[in-house]
Amino acid sequence: MNQSGVHKKKPRIRNRQKNKINQVHQDQEENSLKGDVVQVDIAPKSDNAEPKIIQKVNVSQVEGPLKTDCPQLKSPPKSGNSQVEMPPKSDHSQVENPQENETIRLIQLLLRRKLLAKNKAAAISEAEPVNNQAKIVTQLKETNAEERKPKVPSTSQTPKTPAESKTPGKPLKDVKADEMDELLKCLGSKLQKGGGESPAAALFSNLGKLFSQAPPSDVESSDEEAEEYVEYIYKPRQYFMASLCNFCKADLCGQTRIPCSRCGLSYYCSGGHMKDDQEHRQMCFALRRTVERNGHEMFYKCGDFSGEQFRSYRIVCIRQVEKEMNRPLSATEQELLLFPMICSERKCREHRFKSLSICGGCGEWAFCKDKPGHRSKEHAKWCGAYQLFKAFIMFQANFGRMEPSLPNKVLSELPMACSSTKHMMKKLNFNVTNECEYAALTQVSTGPLTAWFALKLCERLRDCEELTLHLIGAEIEFEVDMLQKWELFLLHIMPTVNTLNVVFIGPELNPNNISFEQLKKIKCCRLCRKAQRTVNYHFENGLYHDYCKEPHFLQPNLVCFFNSGLYRSTGFALEDTWPDTIQAALNIKCPIVVTSYTKYEAPLDMVHFINQSNRHLNVVLPPTTNPFSSEKPERNFISDDETPFMFKNFYCFVVE
Ligand SMILES: [Zn+2]
Ligand SMILES: [Zn+2]
Ligand SMILES: [Zn+2]
Ligand SMILES: [Zn+2]
Ligand SMILES: [Zn+2]
């Protein structure tokens, strides 16, 4: 879509990858249910510049075929996208033909059958566990509470083998199959007889097709052969920000801001929204009770604390409130206590809203009104990050996860001169002007491009036909997310490579609601397939040093530790497994790249690495800002007095 370099003015809401490779996967189980959810693209036809809102429409919302004013029927189908061509809006009164009435009855019956099957299926899919577990214990991560729900895949034109289709949808099908067949036959004959040119007839005919043919889908007209589409929906969670109305999420920067009259910790655009915020109520009462019990306001006299003490204090507050509520706080609720609006001067931390002046740039940062000295110049460095972070939150609250479009240019020469993400995008004829979308793009590209950068530094880019990467401590939400990035940002920029093996290794690679088998089937783009180039994905749900002993171990060209926080001695399940893992990686004797979220962590990680080494390590790159890091800000709690935001792969070092 953007390959021509034409930039878009507005970000797309959910990018449907036209370049095929496509979105992450889905379980076979849901595959069998695919006919039951119709996705309707209500974007204006052929206007890529406008945000597209892809709305999931349940069949259950269609009450009957006559309701042609249903939004999903009104919107023009994308060309080639659907087999259903809707006639002009038809009125009930137009349907006078008894023949047609009979047909309507049949269609309604069919819809009901479909709906029944659908509801059962939905009940099954909802019963599945949702994997929300993120890796980091102390750190607040966006993925922490991100709700990931497996979703019905948009289409899979590849016929399934009987072995592949699992049971949940099947019995329903069997039970109802005969009945459905009968109805369809009957409908078929009605349609033949009652044909005619009336809009209603056209509608019936189309509905007939809808039932008798392939399941409806929202897939782009396929200009290539059948592909398996794999999709994974991330439902971003709600975030608390002091500069957003806690009810409507309107930006309060520069606006009147009304603190909650009871707890004073959430903020609103109006008294009405304060009253309307039912969701806040339970926590609000608990906050009040905690304050009464403590005998002082939540953030009273916090100026005495060091950065570390203040972090601990906020955790204690969370525990107190949880005790009061008799349940754990959600990630969003915790943020109310983790990121309160207080004076940013560490020695002050004034909490009384009336005494505070707020930054007009971001609305997230405050200082004492009557103490100009409490306004530090430091903030200028971060104000932009606050704004970008807020832009993300607001976008996601309105449209769901921001997914950038991706380049698909295949380079014929190594882009040796490219020394930053910006350069590389230019080389790939890819231009994204929206700041949020660009940041999201860097989040996607940073993994493969950082690996490329490390290989370049170690002079391992040339004459390499088969390339194997080990991604240690990989996470579904980061390294595995948008899997095609490994092809687009690595295979496509390394002309000599024919086979790229990406091995994801980690005990936290949680296969609960993701089928690795399905992920492995994701194919390369047409150009790569034509040139017989492939990317193989391997998933090792265990510890690295164990994988190294496996017979199917693949010798790597590069080992990557992305954002692994080696220096923190609590690894998986509170047991420090890093020393063994580092040993194993060092024994392989290939380049190793280690990245970290912050400047502060990188040298600590490196010390940890050197301490574990029993051989001479060649430091190819000492801890340095990574020119291919992510630019998407993530709120930082673990060292918030140093940096309020952190970025994936921000710092890196390379050893050999
Ligand atoms: Zn509001
Ligand atoms: Zn409140
Ligand atoms: Zn600011
Ligand atoms: Zn102050
Ligand atoms: Zn390709």
Image: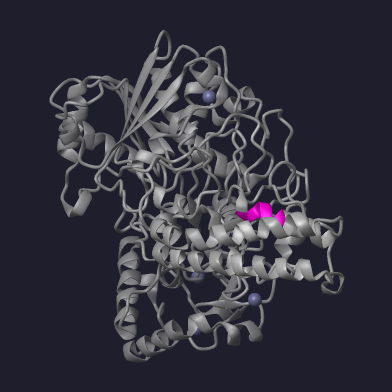
Place residue 367 in its image quadrant: bottom right
- Residue in front for this viewpoint, 324 or 537: 537
Q: How is the image coloured?
A: one colour
The region drawn magenta spans 206-211
Given the current orientation, which residue lies at the most extreme top position?
A: 463
Identify which residue is drawn at 81% across, 62% down: 200
Place residue 470 in its image quadrant: top left
- Residue in front for this viewpoint, 236 or 296: 236
Q: Up-down: is 448 above or below 309?
A: above
Q: Position of residue 573 (x, y in %)?
A: 19, 54
Q: Position of residue 216 (x, y in %)?
A: 62, 51
Place residue 191 in its image quadrant: bottom right
Q: Up-down: is 379 above or below 578?
A: below
Report the predominant secondary structure element of the magenta stretch. helix
Q: Is residue 251 visible?
A: no
**Quarter that holds the N terminus:** top right
Identify which residue is drawn at 22% across, 33% down: 609
Q: Is residue 540 visible?
A: yes
